[in-house]
Image (cartoon, rainbow, N blue to C red):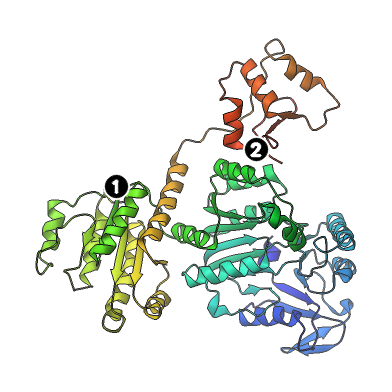
Amino acid sequence: MEKIFNPTSILVVGVSEHPNNLAQNIVANLVDFGWDGDLYLFGKQAGTYLGYPIHTEMGALPDSIELAVMLIPAASIPSLMYSCIEKKIFRMVIESGGFSEFSAAGQALEEEIKALAEKHKVRFVGPNGISIINRHNGLCLPFMRLSPAEIVPGGLSVISQSGGLALTYIGLGCRENLGVAKIISMGNKSNLDEVDYLNFLADDEETKVIGLYLESMDKGRAFIDALKNCKKPVILHKSNTSPQSQVIAQSHTAALAVDDEVVDAACRQAGVFRVHSFGQFINYAKAFSLPAMRGDNLMVISRSGGHAVVAADAAADAGFKLPGLSEDFIARISSQFRASVIKLTNPLDLGDIFDIDYYVTILEMALERDDVDGVVLNHVFQAESEFAATLRLAQKVESLIARHNKPVTLVLFSSISAVSQVMAEISIPIFSEPLIALEALSVSRERSLNRSAAVIPDTPLPLVGKSAASPLFDEWLQDASRRDKTLFADQALTILQEYGLSVPSRTSMIRTFVSPSRAMFTGGSHLRAMSWT
């Protein structure tokens, strides 16, 4: 993976001087994003692009270029792959379409390049995707022009089975101050897949939050193991769950549907946060970009009493507690209220304080309290007269979050342009309403609770001797014709009871974890954990 995401030399295959040539965009993106390695171009006809010569003979290229990026007709890919292998290029990105997602002939081509890769130990991204981005080193390989100003560096990495969805998450994330670490468009994932990328990102220092968009899952057990081993927050947007979507998904990335109940069970088992919309995906990513909400105690600070009431209702619905204000806290801030007509409680209504800079003092006092795990800060401001003070407040919020390592969800209400200008000057996310801010804090708290809960080791059950085993188990172990050693859920539950283990009813267990048609245990000489296929 290192040479794919951090190459020192790149060969772009398929470049020409024709104005509509898409491979030109790959070259232009590398230049615009500041990638500074050795760049080589290859095409059918000699020429130049952006000052780089277009080579027509592989023999003219140096050996051991670290990464080849291909955007040529699918039928030409196998021969170009072999030419690259002869030049000791073993890492590739194949952006071309026309493989298994397109036709039977395309399926044959895909099988050919898979076999070629396996024989020569080649690892490649794709085919049929927009490829990858590493925003921290300038690697930007999609075949459409992108803007460095609109894709800022950060900690969000996305693994997507759709190039369009990958770009959507980039755009939505950067609009919400979620910078990009890595973007991966897997395409048909015929060589490298979500398991490989997830294992890579789990150890990637620049990646803080991982987002997944999947239309199919081909390696259920390996995928769950990778999710369990990943210590970073993972958000999954899984589609292709209905008969209506399966036809287009198959022609899109050759994706086969997976039972939706199985997906939900896998997410619960691995501690993954599943979402069903773009907005929910981005909100969860914003939640995980802030320090963790480690408890139930919340303080709501609001410039508007109405906004405070809305936030209090949302906090109650989410199960948060609003600890009262101490006498010392009230005494320290009461002198700042001009009319003393607002009762000082939590939620704290600051409608009678017009010194916005003093809000910083109140916020810091709240964060210093041991009985406050996080803060919702609602701020309504006039764009013309209060922008400068609001910007100072937002910048102080950012520094206080870092200092106290507690989440503050900053909810701003003003003109769209004024809020956008504030966001441009800070790196923390901003929320559009209290309900969304509370949803973010809720999912952050859930992850904290899950991580602090005791983890039961996933160890196999030892055999206790044939005398204690049921005849069903004994027959299952001895039957040499059962190569896959598949044991269905109703059989497994019966065997567990024979061992003297307490189990839930078969119906409730199957409904809780997986659909009946997918429930099974697998094993050779012992029972292993429940798996799904």
Q: Residue 255 carries which label?
A: none
As drawn, the residue found furthest toward the front would be: 244
As drawn, the residue found furthest toward the top would be: 467
Element under label 1? loop
Q: Can you identify the residue that label 2 sits on?
A: 515
Apparent side of residue 69 relative to residue 153 in the rendered image (left or right): right
Dividing the picture into quadrants, the one containing residue 158 is bottom right
In this view of the protein, can residue 332 be seen by the observer?
Answer: yes
Element under label 2? loop
Q: Tell me the distance, in whole angstroms, between the alpha carbons under discs 2 and 1.
A: 37 Å
Q: Quadrant of the C terminus?
A: top right
- Give me the residue at 68% from left, 54% from top: 196
Look at the picture and state if 254 lies above or below 422. above
Work out whether residue 528 or residue 229 is closer to the camera in this orientation and state it: 528
Q: Can you identify the residue that label 1 sits on?
A: 321
Look at the picture and state if 194 lies above or below 418. above
Work out whether residue 380 or residue 291 is closer to the camera in this orientation and state it: 380
> x, y (%) of residue 215?
68, 56
The tag earlier along the polypeptide, 2 or 1, is: 1
- Give me the residue at 73% from left, 79% from top: 39
Give the amino acid type for the residue marked by disc 1 in the picture: Lys
Apparent side of residue 109 relative to residue 159 in the rendered image (left or right): right
> x, y (%) of residue 44?
87, 82
Give the amino acid type for the residue marked by disc 2 in the picture: Ser
In this view of the protein, can residue 523 be seen by the observer?
Answer: no
> x, y (%) of residue 332?
13, 60
Q: How many neighbours does mark 1 have within 10 angstroms: few (below 14), some (14-19), or many (20 or more)?
A: some
Q: In which quarter of the image is the N terminus?
A: bottom right
Kindly report which numbered mark, 2 or 1, lies closer to the viewer in this rendering: 2
